Image: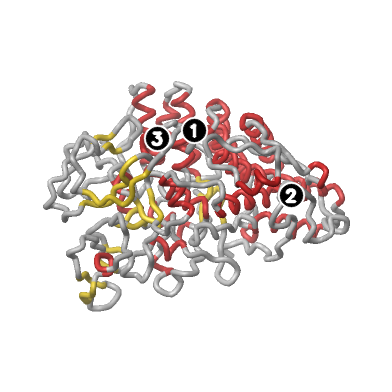
Amino acid sequence: MKKYYIILLLIAFISCRDILDKEPLDGPSDVTFLRTQDELTIAINGLYNNLWFHSISATGQWEYVLDCVTDISWDRNGSFFTAAGNGSLSSTDESIEETWEHLYAGIARSNFILQHIERVEGATAEEIDQAIGQARFLRAYWYSQLVMLWGDVPLVTEIQDLEASKVSRTPKDQVIDFLLSELEIAAEELPLSWGESESGRVTSGAALALRSRVALSDGRYSVAASAAKAVMDMNQYELYPNYRELFQYAGESSNEVIFEVQYQYGIEDHRMSYSVGSRNSRCTSTKVPTQSMVDSYESIDGLPIDESPLYDPANPFENRDPRLKQSIATPGDVFLGFQFETHRDSVECWNYNVDPPVRIPNQDALNPYASFTGYCWKKMADPIDYPDNRNNSSLNFMLIRYAEVLLNYAEAKIELNEIDQSCLDAINEVRGRESVSMPPITAGKNQAEMREIIRRERKVELALEGHRLQDIRRWGIAEDVMDGPLYGRPNENYGYADLGTPSIDENGNPNYNLVDYTDKLRVVEIRSFNPNRDYLWPIPQKDIDTNNQLEQNSNY
């Protein structure tokens, strides 16, 4: 069995409101439930159920769609993600409330288990420890999302009764202290691996990998490096050789996967394939990469495009880091069996899904809702899902993978100014993936040079996996990349437009100010970023109204 089929018994530990306020009133009685080993299994499986959350994106796993509120991707839906990206997010947005509630729902379920697990009968000490470890990890995972998005948040570790319902926000540093401690304990309680029939459960490697992420996000570089190194030393994980396949069914549950959300037809599926697919493949192209993302990939000589003699603005997709075409459908590609052309004059294209190929009306140019940037994501677009399952894909979502751990380790070492061979080896292992084979980073570079390298490497390696928002926030560069025009492809055909080359700054980001792009690139949207407000999301207004102990984030 390639998947662990999570039991579809939803344990409603919480009601839809007052998540922080009271014990569960609409689920099994807390007096009678969680008495047996079977009930413990049901309760733990209920925690994994809470990972299935994609209603606010109307597509797929919400963590991935977070990249649409950054400089590397865009959401055409006019949704919560669009507002969060262009600076118009409001505390009354229903999706803000829904996300806050989703995260605290998982925390409440975890608290219920941890608070009542001592009364379980018939389970071994090992089974109890493993259940506690899973509950600790998932609670820490949801809290890590809360502090990343909102900063200071209420730290609730027990089921609250009505008398203790009004809780204030806990300083972020204290929440981080708690998470690092919990994940260290969870790593001791969890196994290195599970049997094949239980694939998908969290492991000690997942706990340490998340610990490295949380520590890195808060600038605790020694802790981040140590936790990442512990994962590396487990010898449990390795990079999957084919980067493109890693985000297809072939890469599911591979040795690179540390923690993934699993889906299955008929149980729980998603529509990410529908959102990233092309118009010719009868999809919507709503979640699309930006020109800034495309221009961030190096040339194959390992130099950014503004330094490489191999870069040709007239043929911008040639001689580039292979991850560009493995991640993004660019004009001239064959994508999902169709010639992919997005210039408005390309009124016909080839359909290679039939034999012999035929010319068809090109919906990627003719349809008014074709990709607004002129590009599509290939990640999370497996041809197996098209055409029949584009609306109900069961492709898993990786939330933690080994490449991230390697990059966490390298970045922490760079920030500590401990740029030794182990630091270089970690970056070069990612760059040297079999299907990528980018030139290795050589010794002798200073901290500023290495910082530029690791920031660009994270951007291209982890694109459309939900890491970019946290990265640009913790690096303090959000106002540099999130303010002003959001660009798509050139208006003219490649090879004919005199585009010039954008400069690449010290954070690996293209700068279009030095070249006149006013009439040359599609302007998808004008964004605004207020650094005194937009580094955090607003606390949901309904929670402010019902809990006088909560204070709103600044300038909302």
x, y percentage for residue 544? 65, 43
Name the residue rendered at 75%, 47% in the picture: 21
Name the residue rendered at 63%, 64% in the picture: 5
Q: Given the current orientation, which residue lies at the most extreme bottom position? A: 355
Question: Of the residues shown, which amino acid type is indicated by label 3?
Answer: Glu
Q: How is the image coloured?
A: secondary structure
Between disc 2 and disc 3, the foreground one is 3
User: 512 or 176, which lies in front?
Assistant: 512
* Residue 131 tag number: 2
The residue wearing badge 3 is: 479
The quadrant in which residue 355 appears is: bottom left
Name the residue rendered at 41%, 55% in the picture: 75
Question: Of the residues shown, which amino acid type is indicated by label 2?
Answer: Ala
The residue wearing badge 1 is: 409
**Circle nearer the N terminus (1, 3):** 1
Query: Judging from the image, what secondary structure is the residue with disc 1 in?
Result: helix
Q: Compute the Cα span from label 2 to label 3.
A: 42 Å
